[in-house]
Amino acid sequence: MKILYSWLKDFIDLDFTPEELAQKFTQLGMEVASIEKKGADFEGVSVAQITHIENHPDSDHLHLVDLDLGGGKTQRVVCGAPNVAVGQKVPLARVGARLGKTVLGPAKIRGVVSEGMICSSDELGLTNTRARGILVLDENIPLGTDVRTLYGKADALFDLEITSNRPDLMSHLGVARELSALLNKPVKQPAPKEFAGEGESLNVDIRDAQACPRYTGRIIRGVKNAESPDFIKERLSAMGLNPKNALVDVTNYVMFELGQPLHAFDRNEIDGDTIVVRRAQNGEKFILLDGRELTLDENALMIGDDKKATALAGVMGGLNSGIKEDTTDIFIESAYFDAPTTNKTSKTYAVSSDSSQRFERGADIGMTELALKRATELFVAACGGTPSKIRDAYPHPYENPVVHFTPAQINGILGADIAEEKLKDIFSRLALKFDASGKEWTFQAPTHRRDLNHRWDLAEEAARFAGFDCIPAGESRAFVQFNDNPKGVDLLELFSEKLAGLGFYECKNIDFLGEKELKDFGFEPKNAVKIKNAMAKGWDYMRPTLLPALLKNIAFNQSRGNADLALFEATRTFNLIKGFPAETYTVSGVQCGRLTHRPFFKANGEKPDFFFLKGIMQNLLEGFEGVSFAPSVSAPVYMHPKICMDVLINGKKAGVFGAVHPLALKACDVKENEVWAFELALKPLEKMFSAQEFKPAKAVTAFPPSLRDLSVMLDKTVPYAQIKDVLQNTPLNVNLRFDLIDLYEGDRLPQGKKSVTFTLAFSAPDRTLKDAETDAAFNALLENLKAKTGAELR
Amino acid sequence: MTLQEFKENCAHIEREYTDKIASAGNVSAVEELRVAALGRKGALTELLKNLKDFSIEDKKAAGPLGNALKAALTQALEEKTAALAAQELNEQLNRVDLDLTLPARPVPCGKRHPLSIAQKRMTDILSKLGFTWAEGPWVEDEKHNFDMLNIPKHHPARDAQDTFFAQTGSPLSMVLRTHTSNVQSRFMEKHQPPLRIMAPGRVFRNDSLDATHSPVFHQIEGLYVDKNVSMADLKRDLTAFMKGLLGDKTEIRFRPSFFPFTEPSAEVDVKCVFCSGKGCHICKGSGWIEMLGSGVVHPNVLKNCGIDPEIYSGYAFGMGVERLAMMMMDINDIRAFYENDLRLLNQF
């Protein structure tokens, strides 16, 4: 809401600088988005010309400047501006001149008395920022001219952010009322000229009293549209509106002044003598003042006559009944439309106006008649004409609820200690009715303050007017509780920290993706959460997978010159289960390029392979029971069909890892054909995880193991898993750990054969093994391998 | 040989070999001395052979003397050998010529996202202040996101949120939560006071994507409900929170504002940490930086959650994570958080 300082002064006496006033606004809860200063706030500054400059005897940057004031008068002043030069015409403030609030006196500057000063634009208050030197004026301006006449009257335009609970502040009168309560100064109540009224106004037939509890109006006959008077034009221009003509401008002017939206109809376009306030019929067509055609339904509240609709109530008039240049009789509507109705109408048809913005926040039902009188006064002054009587349909006058409370309750909410007298003072300034005679106080707000409904509202008023600094930082309160974090949160954190430690960078991506990506990644759009009012195409769904975004992060970084990447994201994914939205904590990662993010002189850059990724997965899931990996029987479409494993948790699939399918890479613009990826749903891990639980240790033996290498040759078709199985399940009297150290498939072996070599570590918890024991175990393993896999010792 | 001669010889050998050992220049020279002194035909070995001819009395005097000398020489020889070996090793080590200024091997090491770092700072501090982590759905029904929080249908406060609406099979009208405050309604509907929770997480607004706006961003919510919780409790805890976040000298101020779910409502500013309140470009000359919105929980919200506002009261606050991160990490475009450029990510 724009507020013009000079307009505000119509309603309250103020002598603050604009900056001081801005502080008051802030204190009251109106954020000042900007202050735009206009015109000149100084007196006694006149145009003079510089005739001579010499250096100050005691300074290397100050000058002694002689000026011609015109009429044979001269003046010498001290000046430190860097841009001073002979011949310039400049604004000279002599002793006695006023600059803002300062009256200039003589000043002794390094021993030289200066009886005036050459001003810069900020010293004159013409700009907010500090100027770099004196203001140099046009050389054609006559000497001695009052500089004020060059800039017009001083004023300031504030742009205030009004919160949606305070529609009463969307007018100059409203802001003045608020300042009045703060400063304890009276509001100069508007008292427009009264007209007796000749002839009747239109009848009013309100068919929805809930939506329109008050409708006030009158006709002015015999007007001649004209230009608005200067003060209206100037003020509207300052507010950022283009003045049109008086019949249009006055309604806007009164709205900015008193907060009441008005609408002026061409009387002669209204059929019959009755204004009807009604709901629109389903399918009813209506053309707005701006030419847009709407098809309405019963949500819309309409103003109309016997035959047709003439306005979308409280929002915008119709094209059929607007004011024209040659309009002679006008009907002025000053009504109250309730907030939800107006909001619904405005939202449904996407029409918003200054008027609808006031009604949907809540206008002042008590203001309609006064505003109508004020408009009448201005219309008649500008356009002549004869006002009719006023017709005010207001069957049930509105009153705000009475709030019962005690001063202790107010201080209790605030944790403050505001004196009762102070509270009484504040509430009496705000109330329509206030009674503090008993132990329990009562307060009733005037009609323009519908937001004051219970004691919490009054507590806020008390704090605002006493100053929010009245609230102390309270005493410490003991409150002991301990609750675990939600498990999903702890798991996300655990996996994120592990991945960062394993060389992965955390990413955060927007949660939206498009239908094409869904399909590219094998997800059914009907099982995804769709956004009805998506911002952009491609952002229509909540993502069921984190991988597309991570692959795009690869593409983005490649385009910025980084091709060696390990990225992860840990957050929620979304899908529909039987139609209901389900959210899953998910962690996904991608890796491509070299393991080391930069080339290095001692290595050519080792690349990760599938088994590196498998190691990452093993590290991530280390410590969780029941986790196993199995080659995917049918890999997801975005994964390589043969290089993909399922992560099984207690036999149930919880994720996959492997190589990304080249088509998925292409879909995400990745310029690389080998990208490793994993995606893991954390839900199945929650049951077996507690960040708070301590894990019991297994004993470690003090006796070193006996090491043996075992190298066997067997058919290529025997998978490692089978060999591992045999090693793990051969009954032994000792403990065994085994590591695969070599795998060979090549020319030195017979066709169809491979050779595997293990390092076997045999141990016992209570002793160093004897050779015979080790040999027995070794042979048992070998024999079992021979029997189960057809292996031969090499 | 007399005992006296024996003693003299011992002294002589001790002097001679102590000097020779001390001045030996390498390990083989020491070995030669060992042979010369203690070897089968060594000087001391030969001398000790004379003992067999001594009287018992003399043996008692000479024996220990000879043995002590043998032990002393053995030790001196060993020490000298070790010293020489160490010296040789050191010489060998000193011949190594490795250019230590060559670049470090790029050992892979990842990083957390700057927003995670900022959020963790906040949750760590709030944990210390006794707040429990609570979560709520991101795809939320309108009841929990709006209605229960005193944001009625057809109210401008609801419009101001630029809501994304979700299409699901739920009979309820679903939205992407517009704030973390849905966790307030979710939590209070299930728990009676006293309760103190924090709820960090993503929120969604159908707003433009530009340098200062993103349709997805992060907030952190705080809520405390108990008997007699007041604005003063809020001020104390927010002061502690901000001091934890921005340093012990941090000052805060309350400014009146409006949020539908709090009454009274306060915008919280901190004294500009960049200019100590003198006014700079970051605080736009005001000396204060807007940090978060807060207030006393609106009685309607408590009622809607089944908590009696005549018995209990509470405070709530909500703060933007991006805003703080942008300010403290000197990032001037919110989109940078969602681009995931490695050159940004690896700075934190």
Image (spheres, coloured by chain):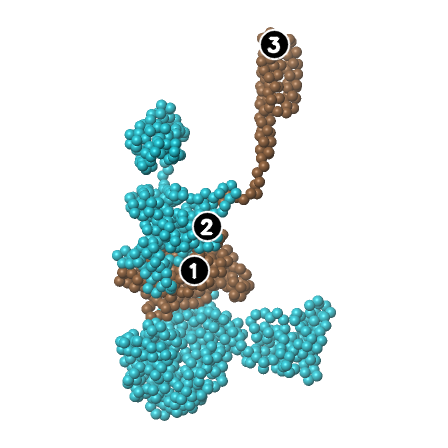
Chain colours: A cyan, B brown
**Which residue lies under the disc numbered 1?**
B320
Q: Is residue A177 left or right of residue A646?
A: right
Give above or below for A446 relative to A759.
Answer: below
At 38% from the left and 63% from the top, the residue drawn is: A536
In the rendered view, does A790 fall on the left or right side of B242? Answer: left
Tell which tag, 3 or 1, sits nearer the viewer: 1
Q: Quadrant of residue A201?
A: bottom left
In this view of the protein, which residue sits in the foreground, A509 or A184? Answer: A509
Tell me whether marks 1 and 2 sit on the same chain: no
Residue B145, quarter of picture = bottom left
Crowding near the residue tagged with mark 2, few <14, some 14–19, many ≥20 C-alpha atoms within 10 Å: many
**Disc 2 designates what residue?**
A563
Mark 1 element type: strand
Q: Residue at x 39, y 76 (%)?
A: A353
Is A34 positioned to the left or the right of A523 in the image? right
Q: Kindly indicate whether the residue at mark 3 contacts the one at mark 2 (C-beta within 8 angstroms).
A: no
| Residue A660 at least partly seen | yes
Percent across and percent down for residue B183 are 35, 58
Q: Residue furthest right?
A: A57
Q: Given this view, does label 1 or label 2 mark the residue nearer the observer?
A: 2
